[in-house]
Amino acid sequence: MLPYGSIGEAEAALGRGLTFAETLWFNYSATKSDYFLYLHNILFLFLIFTLVPLPLVFLELSGSVGLDKYKIQPRVRLSFSEMLRCYKDVMWMFFFVVGPLQLVSYPTVKMIGIRTGLALPSGWEIFMQLLVYFVIEDYTNYWIHRFLHCKWGYQKIHRVHHEYTAPIGFAAPYAHWAEILILGIPSFLGPAIAPGHMITLWLWIALRQIEAIETHSGYDLPWSPTKYIPFYGGADHHDYHHYVGGQSHSNFASVFTYCDFLYGTDKGYRYHKKLVAKMKDDESEKMQ
C-alpha cells in the first residue's frame, strides 16, 4: 500500500510530477495491500496456462499443410481429448500446488525486498533485471534438470514431465508436484539476488511461463520473435530433449543454449541436426 493519500503528496515526496505510468500505478495500487498485489501472480499464471497455448491447440488440430512443415515431430499429433486431459492435469496442479504456494510465499518476497512503491523502475532497469533473472534461472535450472535425469530423479519425479515425447504448449507446466517445487528455486533466485519492483516480478513470472510454453509448442515457427534472441534455444532445441526421452543426456537448458554447448550436452542434438540436414539434401538430389 502506498504511503501517500493523494497524487499531490506523492509528487511532493518525489520532488517531481508523476509519469503517466506512475499515475496509473498510483490510481490502481494506492489503497491495495502489498500482499494483494503479489497475489496477482495467481491470476496471471491461470490466464497464461489457459490462453497462451490455445493458438497451438488450433494449430495442432487444423492440420494445415502450409503450417505442418513447421511441426518438429510431424508424425505425432495429439487429439483434442488428449490435450484437454493435459490441461485438466495442469489445472489440478495449479489449484492444489502452484496457487497455494503463491498464497504462502509472500513473506519470502517481502523479505528479499520486492517493493511496490514509487518511483517506478525505468524500462532499462526492468530489462536488465529480467535479463539477470533469465540468466540465473537458466544456469541453475540446467544443473537441477541434469540431476532430475539421474536414475533416481527421473524414475521418482521427472518421468511425469516426459510423458509427452512430442510436447505441446499445455505440457510446459505438466510435471510432478515435487518438480514444480524444486524448479521454483531457480525462478526465485534471480529476484532474490537482484530484487526489483513488483511490476518487474509480475513480468518475470509471466515471461518465464510464456517462454516455457513456446519451447514446448512442438512447432519451430520462423516468424517467432525469439529467433532474434542470442543463444536462445527455442522449441527445436527443447523438443529434441523430449524426443530422446528418459535416456536423454542432451539439451538440459531451459532458455539459452550456452550451458549445453560449454558442458558438451548438446552433442547428440548437433549430430541429429546434421543427420536430418543430410537426409533432406539427399532427398532433394533424388528429386532433381
Image: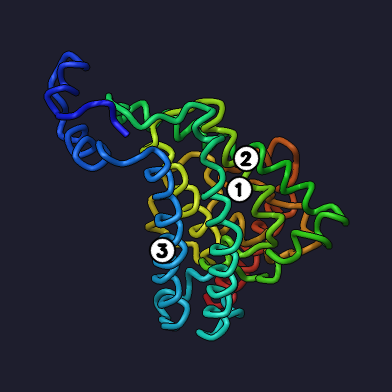
- Look at discs 1 and 2 and give the one toward the viewer: 2
- The residue carrying mark 3 is 52
Determine whether the residue tagged by mark 2 lies in a helix, strand or loop: helix
Vertical relation: 32 (above or below) 154: above
Task: Indicate the position of residue 96 as horizontal and vertical percent values.
Answer: 59, 63
Indicate left or right for 282 with 244 as reference.
left
Determine whether the residue tagged by mark 1 lies in a helix, strand or loop: loop
Q: Which mark is residue 213?
A: none
Q: Image quadrant of residue 160?
A: bottom right
Measured Cα–Cα span from mark 1 to mark 3: 18 Å
Q: Earlier in the sequence, mark 1 or mark 2?
A: 2
- The residue carrying mark 2 is 186
Measured Cα–Cα span from mark 1 to mark 2: 11 Å
- The residue carrying mark 1 is 254
At x 43%, y 39%, the residue is: 201
Q: Is residue 72 visible?
A: no
Q: Earlier in the sequence, mark 3 or mark 2?
A: 3
Going by the numbered disc 3, the residue's amino acid type is Val
